[in-house]
Amino acid sequence: MALVSHRYGGADGGNPGRSAAEIAAEKQAESEAKAIYRDILGRAPEHDFDPTIERVKSLMSLLGDPQRSFRAIHLTGTNGKTSTARMIERLLRELGLRTGRFTSPHLHSVRERIAIDGESISAVRFVEVWRDVEPYVAMVDAELAGRGESQLSFFEVLTGLAFAAFADAPVDVAVIEVGMGGEWDSTNVVDAEVAVVTPISRDHERWLGHTLAEIATVKSGIIKALDPPAVVVTAEQREEVATVIADAARSRGARVVAEGYDIDVAERTVAVGGQVINLRGTGGLYTEIFLPLHGAHQAQNALLALASVEAFLGGGALDPAVVEVAFAEVDAPGRLEIVRRSPTVLVDAAHNPAGAEVLVAALEEAFAFSRLVGVVGVMADKDAEGILSVLEPELAEVVITHSSSMRSMDVDDLAEIARDVFGEDRVHVAERLDDALALAVDLTENDDRLGGTGVLVAGSVILAADARAMFGRA
């Protein structure tokens, strides 16, 4: 399929000169969109599902297979998927392509998950697309009920809605992040010519397996046998993971572009507000690129994004000016984000031990706190002890709380784990996040040493979202 460039505004709106009637329609649509979200949310949640894509295939077939109307780059891995997806999308948009982006979870609004030309789908378009998709969802639900099966899940429905929105826009290319895993993930109905694998570690073991090889096998399911062959762009992985990815690619005739062999972060220097990086892609060396994000992991994400777009466009070099502009304008909300100063309050969505490790490394590199107090809440199905153990050396004290999610771990249970890790005297408890933040700020003032003090909010994507909202970042 040939690339087609569209330079007109997105189907989701964004015209700054809107009329009063358009503004009123948007407000009405906001209310309707929230009601639709609540209704879809009443289905099986995205963390409780049947591991199959046959149900989504049925929905796509009824919708006319919208996923076949655009080219795609598909991402899997354990951490870094959303940041990498945002970087890929920004590069593609700077190249003049019309883009769709489907990521999860969202921070504040479900509409964030479906972006067209870099902007969340508007409430008006969200409602319009849902009204188009809804009758077909009902048809699949009825068919499933007839077989004694549960209705389509939240994520299955949302995937259908996203792909329909992208087809209707229409977009040239969609950047699609898996919801979970890969092989049986709802998004895997798409045949992406570029598959991206961010670092794989242990997470979601109930569904993906208890060994890294098992997890990698599920995730490598996004690699497709295509003509011309697909390209797999992978981060540096542990040996057992790299072997699984290589075997999967070989069996499907795909070509592998691997960090450490074909591509590298050649150089990286900490800078004010981020870092300056040199990236060696398949098309050559790109130098002096400013990336307004902290940490070696974000440089790695940028490398994967660059190599993915190179592969998407045939493997040659990209215009260095395009790369420079695109990366300079990348943002990653809730990823080591400063939401307040004096004291500095940082918010990060790290929600597993591997994510906590890259968070700690970035903190040590980019900040010099004399005293850092943590505000931590963790989902009940996560490795709380692992997360807290990684954070412990960086935190003078920790305030245990919980997010607005019903899946959040009970505060008393998490506090008990925290006391085992930190010791009794360093652990505080606050049921409400606003109280936890206030207490943490007070605790940063209990330090007479020279240097900056700060508060770190981490442990859950939803906790990060809740904190951002309290500081007016929603």
Image (cartoon, grey):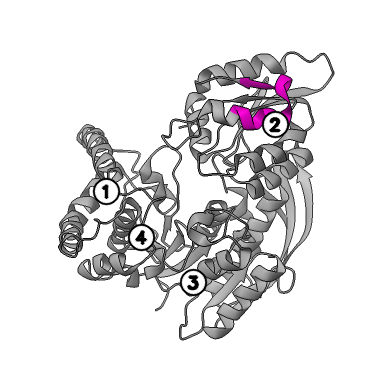
Q: Identify the residue position indicated by label 3 in the image.
A: 221
Q: Identify the residue position indicated by label 2 in the image.
A: 420
Whichever of labels 1 and 4 marks the residue nearer the N terminus, that label is 4
Q: Residue at x 51, y 44 (%)?
A: 381
Give the residue type that dot 4 points to.
Answer: Asp
| Quadrant location, the N terminus | bottom left
**Residue at mark 2 to residue at mark 3: CA–CA distance:** 39 Å
Marks 3/4 in contact by CB < 8 Å: the verdict is: no
Q: Which secondary structure class fits the magenta region best?
A: helix
Picture layout, residue 354 above or below residue 230:
above
Q: Residue at x 82, y 13 (%)?
A: 448
Front tag of 2 and 3: 2
**Residue at mark 4 to residue at mark 2: CA–CA distance:** 36 Å
Q: Identify the residue position indicated by label 1 in the image.
A: 125
Give the residue type that dot 3 points to.
Answer: Gly
Segment colored magenta: 415-428
Give percent across and percent down for residue 449. 84, 17
Marks 4/2 in contact by CB < 8 Å: the verdict is: no
- Density class for disc 4 (Cα within 10 Å; few <14, some 14-19, many ≥20) is some
Give percent across and percent down for residue 184. 41, 66
Whichever of labels 1 and 2 marks the residue nearer the N terminus, that label is 1
**Residue at mark 3 to residue at mark 4: CA–CA distance:** 16 Å
Q: Secondary structure at mark 2?
A: helix
- Density class for disc 1 (Cα within 10 Å; few <14, some 14-19, many ≥20) is some
In front of the other: 269 or 296: 296
Q: Identify the residue position indicated by label 4 in the image.
A: 50
Q: Secondary structure at mark 4?
A: loop
Left or right side of 232 for 178: left
Give the residue type that dot 1 points to.
Answer: Arg
Q: Residue at x 47, y 28 (%)?
A: 469
Give the residue type that dot 2 points to.
Answer: Asp
